[in-house]
Structures are given as structure tokens and as C-alpha cells.
Amino acid sequence: MLKETSLAATLRVWRERLTPAQAGLPDRASRQTPGLRREELAELAGLSVDYLVRLEQGRSTAPSGPAVASLATALRLTQAERDHLYVLAGLRPPADQLISDEISPAVMRLLTRLGDVPVSVFAADWRQIWWSQSWAALVGDPSSVAPEDRNFVGACFPVPGGRSRVSGWPVLGDHPGKAKRARVADLRLASAQYPNDPRLMDLLHNLIGGNPEFAEMWRAGVVGNHSQDHMVVQHPVVGDVWVDCDVLTVGDTNLKIVTMTAEADSEDARRIERARQALLSVVGER
């Protein structure tokens, strides 16, 4: 690790950027050092000054979890900074996040600028939370499916009595086994990031207990991101449509933007457009 990015250097930088006023301390005009003094940070964090000196000099490199938590609070760190501090200390950041279904205004602006591209947004547990009209035209409108049943992994690994569905007609990958393993690996990654999320835990409980194929793949322990597929949509009106399915992950929320595209001016691209026009004509008649 570079000296400038070490735990010691990072603690010094964060201490020196925090003003006494930000820390709730009186700001004396005679202060000559930037930010907080070591004595002040040590008191705020409930640590000894000697221990803080050893941390900042790199003579102590493995603080305990409670010490890191106290320093993070005293330094007024953001969640990302707090997690980084844990990593620098050789510790796993606390898992206090829950899966978010919120799409930020910036991401929504991006989605609306994709034009007629079939696109959908999934949460970190693969619950479908938004889709474009072109997506509905190509794979089927999921609006009639209850929100809790719009789960992509649940649809790939059905369980007895389950109703998970995100497409109206078959959507098949050219390497189904590989694609399924990738989805399980992606869900395992989410389980480490959100171990306390009740919705994700319920999903895993149902899939492990209700689908032997999922349970077998889960026990393999593979971890990774599901990023792309080459798939055929068996559309009931325009026929088979081969598409490239790409998955883009959005920042700290781990939202997944899924797009389905075909090469420009190809027959598959023309079929996507015909499917979109077919849906528009149906909507126009209503």
C-alpha cells in the first residue's frame, strides 16, 4: 500500500480537515494546527492519545472494530468513508444497509434518454422496479404481476406455488447453464452486501428450499456479477428476436439497468421496432 493511502495517512488527513466547530468543540483563535488536535480527536473517540499517535504514525495498524467505529463517528465520516476506514484497518465494514428500490433523478434522466431501447431496472435482489414501454413490447408487460413477484432470479428458478415472472413469453439464453450460474453468483454477492435485508433473506430461503437446481448452484459458492447474455425472445407476434442483454450496475445502490439491443439495421432490430409498434397500436385502441 502506498504510504499516502495507508490507514495512518488517511486518519491524519481526516483529522486535519475536520474543524472544531464541525466536531462541536470551541474554536480558539490561537489555534495553529489545521483541523482537530490529536488530543481532541482522542477524547471524542474515547481513545488514549498515545494509541491515536501510534495509529497515525503507522506503529499500530490493526485497530479493533469498536475503535474504528468510534473514530468514524468522531471524524464525522460519510458511510463510504466509514467503510473505507474499516477496509484500511483490515476489517469488514458493518452490514447495515437495506436494498433500495429508489431510482435517483439522475438515473431516471439517463433512462429517459435511451429512447426506444428496451430497458428495465432491477434492485440488488433482482426485483424488477421499472421498465420502458419498449421493454414491455419486447418481453411482455409485467404491470399485471404483483411487485413482490417481479423477481428475475425467482423466475429463472421457479418454486412450487411460486408466481415470479418478469416476461410474458419465453426469453432464453444461448448458454442457459452459464447464465443461471452467473445469476446465482450475483445473488450471492448481494447476500454479502445486504446480509440483514429481510426481503433478500426470504428470497434465498424460498429458492434454496424450493428449487434443487438453485440450491446446488448456491452450494458451489461462486461469487460474481451478472453482466451480459445473448438471448432469444420468442415473441408471439414478430417471431424470435435475438438480443444482446447487458447489465449495468448503478453506484452504491447496486441497482441494475438491463438493456436488450440488436445490431442496427438488422432483422432483429426491425423486429424489436415492430413489437414496439404493435404495442403502441394496442394501447391506442384502448
Image: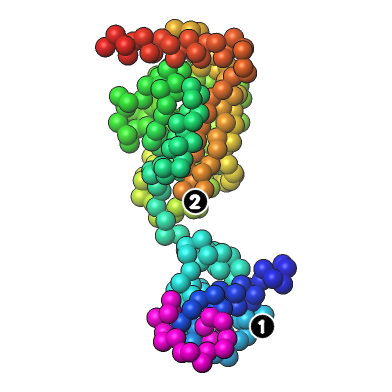
Residue 35 counted in the magenta span? yes
Compared with 160, 249 (above or below) is: below
Q: Residue 240 appears at what percent x and percent y?
A: 53, 11
Compared with 102, 117 (above or below) is: above
What segment is highlighted magenta in the picture?
21-38
For mark 1, what is the residue? 57
Give the residue displayed 37% in from the left and 21% down from the top.
141
Give the residue displayed 49% in from the left and 25% down from the top.
115
Secondary structure of the residue carrying numbered label 1: loop
Secondary structure of the residue carrying numbered label 2: loop
Q: Residue 165: which quarter of the image? A: top left
Compared with 129, 285 (above or below) is: above
For mark 2, what is the residue? 252
The reply to whether dot 2 and dot 1 touch (C-beta < 8 Å) is no
Give the residue displayed 51% in from the left and 61% down from the top.
80
The N terminus, quarter of image: bottom right
